Image (cartoon, helix red, strand yellow):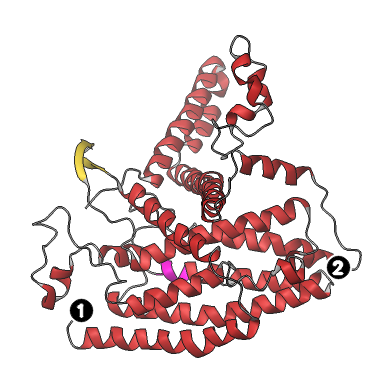
Amino acid sequence: MSGHLLDLFGLAHAISAFLLGVVKAIFYGLGGLIPPAVGPLQGVGDFFVSEWLVTLVAWLLAITVMLLWATMINLLTMMWIERKFYARLQDRVGIKIGLPSMDFLARIPLIGGLFRRFVRRPSHLGVGYLQNVADGVKLLQKENLTPAKADRFTFHAAPVIIASSTLLIFAAIPFSEGFTIMPNPNPFGILFILAAFGIAPLAILIAGWSSNNKYTLIGGMRSAAMLMSYEIPMLLCVIAVVVLTGSLDPFEIVRQQTVSLGEAIPLLSFLPSTSAAPFYIPNWFFIPQVLGFVVFSVAILAEQERLPFDLPEAEAELVEGWLTEYSGMRFGLVFGFKWLRALAGSALLVILYLGGWTGPGIQVASFNGLPIFLPFQELWFLLKIYLVFLVFVWVSWSFPRIRIDQILNIGWKQLIPLSLLTILLAVAMKGLGVYV
């Protein structure tokens, strides 16, 4: 199995210790220049290298890196993937404006003439990645309007709650055994992720009510009804996985998916083991829990309010639903964080059912006694997340929207019984010793 490439907290601790050590050296140097102040300045320098302060700065730095990684890299990447992919599904040209289309390149001496004919027009040299940045800049320039009769406090608070609760999810989602904010092991990691997921529907209902608009109110009520009906089967499917693993720790859940099926299930002992074969058949939980995997996938798709479950917005009939009265960057913030929730939902699906960051790897070197593998865990995890997201996009742009009564019937009358069945299957497998 491959190893992780990055120890996020260890790296952040080393950087913070180095920077605060530089500050200490500065104070010690000043103390040497001003002899009467040697003692006080050295005391201040010693304060900056206190273990608790170094640890605090390391945690803040690690959190900042994780949030920038999620919002500035993966958010733009997932937006770009969806826009390019559904353009191909619909057999049309997707976004193509790229770096060669930017004005500043044409002004560079000597080489500016090479880019002049591409400025402000689609270019075959561009892949469209920067189009998302351009859309964000455009939304930043637009005016934020507040309805005259809206409840101003809750109207402004709803996007903040949605954004903050989404970012809170990434505090508990590990991208590998080392690239994580929460400690390893984390006995309540999955519970924390699901709790953070459950905050946004409340904020959506608040946004719909506070706008004082019948379309937003209907959209908010639809959202509350739909998300409630799909969160229940999603939680029940997680219970089935917890029954198999006996843990809510995402690291433990992934760890129990690293052995082959031949080692985990005695009836399949003829399959190759991890020690005997470098390319093993992993014990991913979608194999013994294929029904739970399907139910959870449908529920997490509904949690993202994507087609065919985008009825809370239903732009064809509700003019963007609960987002009707939001404009400017407030609209862009909520709309962009839908992709972040898609990233978090795909990551949770991969952790629970698709082996997380596990995958075959070859050790190519070692650093400080730690082996370095290619491909490494972070690469495997991102690859699985993007493949799951592509399936979500494929489904979203292939199926039409379904009615509100059909959505609720699917959630309450079909998914909940099936999710209860997944728990019974998990209990039976553990009780009969089929799954050790």
Residue at left 34%, top 60%?
356
Q: Quadrant of the C terminus?
A: bottom left
Q: Position of residue 386 (x, y in %)?
A: 43, 54
Q: Would residue 87 be seen by someone viewing this image from the given angle?
A: yes
Q: From the viewer's perspective, tell me whether residue 331 is left or right of residue 385.
A: right
Q: From the viewer's perspective, tell me whether residue 373 is left or right of residue 66.
A: left
Q: Position of residue 6 (x, y in %)?
A: 35, 43
Query: Disc 1 or 2, which lies upstream in sequence?
Result: 2
Residue designated by label 2: 150
Q: Position of residue 422 (x, y in %)?
A: 35, 84
Asked if the magenta segment contains residue 191, the reply would be yes
Q: Residue furthest front?
A: 91
Q: Amino acid at mark 2?
A: Ala
Residue at left 32%, top 55%?
357
Q: Which residues fall within the magenta stretch?
A: 188-192
Q: Secondary structure at mark 2?
A: loop
Q: Position of residue 80 (x, y in %)?
A: 55, 47
Check disc 1: other Cα within 10 Å, few if <14, some if 14-19, many if 20+. some
Q: Nearer the viewer, residue 353 or 187?
A: 353
Q: Secondary structure at mark 1?
A: loop
Q: Nearer the viewer, residue 371 or 296?
A: 296
Residue at left 17%, top 84%?
433
Q: From the viewer's perspective, tell me whether residue 140 is left or right of residue 240.
A: right
Main SS, magenta region, reads: helix
Residue designated by label 1: 435
